[in-house]
Image: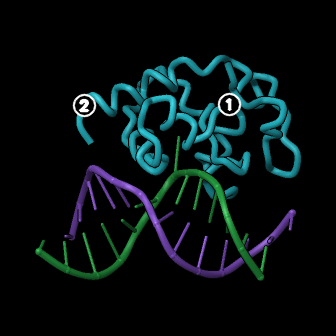
Chain colours: A cyan, B green, C purple
Amino acid sequence: MNEITTQSILMVIRDIPEGFVSTYGDVAKRAGLPGYARHVGYVLKNLPENSQLPWHRVINSQGKISFPTDTVQYREQRQRLTAEGLIFTNNRIPLRKYLWRD
DNA sequence: TTAGTGACCGACT
DNA sequence: CAGTCGGCCACTA
C-alpha cells in the first residue's frame, strides 16, 4: 500500500454523509481500487486515535459491524451510528435504507 | 521466499 | 435465512 492509495481511501470515507453508511467494498471501488475491500479495513485499523474520520460509517456488505458483538469496538461503532439516527434490526443496518448512493 | 493472516466479498449450498 | 468456500492482495513473521 502506497500513500496515494491510502489517501484515496481516506478521502472517500471522509465524504460519507452523516446518517448514512458505506461498505468496505464500495469504499474501495469509489477510491478506484476494486478488489481492495480488505485493505480498507487495514487502513482503518491503523487509523490514529485522534482521527476525525467518520470510520464508524463503514460496515460490511452484509450490513453488519465487522467486530465481534462482545467487544468495546463494536459497542463504540454501534453507539456512534445510533447517535446519528440509524436503526439496527437484529444487529444489522438495513442497507436498503442507509447505504450511501449518489 | 513462503506461509499465514485479515474491521472483506460474492456465489453457492 | 445461515454457513461454506474460494478469491482477493498487502502486510508480517
Q: Quadrant of residue A97?
A: top right
Q: Is residue A27 above or below residue A70?
A: above
Q: Is residue A46 above or below residue A17?
A: below
Res. A3 mark: 2
Q: Which residue is mark 1?
A: A21
Residue at image coords 83%, 36%: A96
Q: How many C-alpha atoms fall within 10 Å of the one at disc 2: few (<14), some, or many (≥20)?
A: few
Q: Position of residue C10 (x, y in %)?
A: 27, 50
Residue at image coords 79%, 47%: A92
Q: Does residue A71 show up?
A: no
Residues C12 and A48: in front is C12
Q: Secondary structure at mark 2?
A: helix
Chain containing mark 1: A
Q: Quadrant of residue A71?
A: bottom right
Q: Quadrant of the C terminus of chain A?
A: top right
Residue at image coords 64%, 38%: A77
Find the distance from the CA under tag 1 to the CA under tag 2.
Answer: 24 Å
Residues A91 and B8: in front is B8
Res. A10 mark: none
Q: Is residue A58 above or below residue C10?
A: above
User: Residue A99 vs residue B7: left or right?
Assistant: right
Q: Quadrant of the N terminus of chain A?
A: top left
Residue at image coords 55%, 42%: A24
Q: Does residue A48 show up?
A: yes
Mark 2 belongs to which amino acid?
Glu
User: Residue A24 vs residue A34: left or right?
Assistant: right
Mark 1 belongs to which amino acid?
Val
Q: Position of residue C11 (x, y in %)?
A: 26, 53
Q: Position of residue A49 (x, y in %)?
A: 41, 32
